[in-house]
Amino acid sequence: MIVNPFADAGQAKKIWQKIEVQLKEEKVNYRVEMTDHPGNGVQLARDFALHHKLGEKWVVVAVGGDGTLHEVLNGLHLGGGDQIPLGYLPAGSGDDFARGIKMPTQPLAAVKQFLEVQHAISLDVGVYKNRMDSHETFFTNNVGIGFDASVVHAANAGQKDNLKKYHLQSNAYVASLIKTFFRQKPFGLSVKTNETEQKFSRAFLVTTTNIKYFGGGVPIMPLADLHDGKLDLVVVEQLGAPRFIRLFIQMLTTGNHLKSRVVHHFRTSQLHLETTLPENGQVNGENIQKQKFNIDFWVTQRPFWIKDVAQ
Ligand SMILES: Nc1ncnc2c1ncn2[C@@H]1O[C@H](COP(=O)(O)OP(=O)(O)OP(=O)(O)O)[C@@H](O)[C@H]1O
């Protein structure tokens, strides 16, 4: 168990204490490591993978939010542990992956479901690589460029100041959304998939997603499927404030945003994106440094210790 006690603005520590009572009651054989700084989940998972042989019956479980899951996934990869089943118990503020896989976000219900799992299942994970370097990053949820990434950057900066995470329902989140909306400038984008090539001169929000949700419960891609070997790319072109609000409401309610003329959807197993300007980026709600993106995406599969609930 790799636990981030600081997830959900520190609430995860209390959640973990409750989870532990349940694990002990069920006589589960486990070891626990607490992350003690950002990025520590990567180190702990990598070290575990480096010191445990394939074929041993271990499951590595990330306990925290989408950021913790992201760190553990990548740490296992760095330690050569791509075949070690990855479990997840949601204890974060957004928990988009848990929502996407229809896992209960209530921690004790999630533990109960976790203990019912009999075997690992194979699920899609996205991979991206910047053409300027050789480092591959895996992701369970999504990678955003432009507006959604700028919202994440603003939220993470706010979190540093007061450890308060923005929630979709909170006034602070809505205020940050509006402020960022007016700050975000459109940018040129080129999209290349297996089948098609398209250029946008005024891209605004560019999200490559493996699951239905981003931003703590916003269903950006209702059709996303973790079993189809594909990623979904959603490009939203620049739009005025009233239209943006309408689109956002459609996103939250009917899913009709996908029918809008300013929204473009691509489903593909391979993707190349290039931006004309340096833009903010985000992966699973964690900042990617502002840069001119020249980036490739593809899909792979890895084992998860998670109950398979059909999408
Ligand atoms: N001991 C620690 N102290 C401070 N930050 C930590 C610590 N351990 C991990 N972190 C960082 O906490 C951040 C947030 O974690 P995480 O994303 O899991 O929770 P969350 O933001 O509440 O949930 P979600 O992403 O689902 O909204 C990550 O960037 C991670 O690197």
Image (cartoon, grey):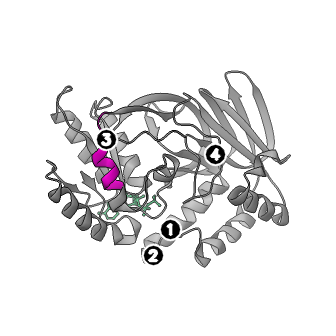
Q: On residue 117, which mark appears?
A: 3
Q: Which badge, 2 or 3, comes first in the chain's sequence?
A: 3
Q: Look at 83% across and 56% down and name the residue there.
A: 239
Q: Secondary structure at mark 1?
A: helix
Bounds of the magenta segment: 110-119
Give the amino acid at mark 2.
Asp
Question: What label does residue 207 carry, if any?
Answer: 4
Q: Earlier in the sequence, mark 2 or mark 4?
A: 2
Q: Do the numbered discs 1 and 2 sit on residues whose CB atoms are within 8 Å?
A: yes
Name the residue nearer the viewer: 143 or 65.
Answer: 65
Q: Are marks 3 and 1 in contact (CB under 8 Å)?
A: no
In front: label 1 or label 4: 4
Q: Is mark 1 within 8 Å of ligand 1?
A: no
Residue 283 vertical placement versus 105 (above, below): above
Tell me if residue 63 can be seen: no
- Residue beneath label 2, please? 161
Percent position of residue 306, x then y: 37, 42
Which residue is denoted by mark 1 in the rendering? 157
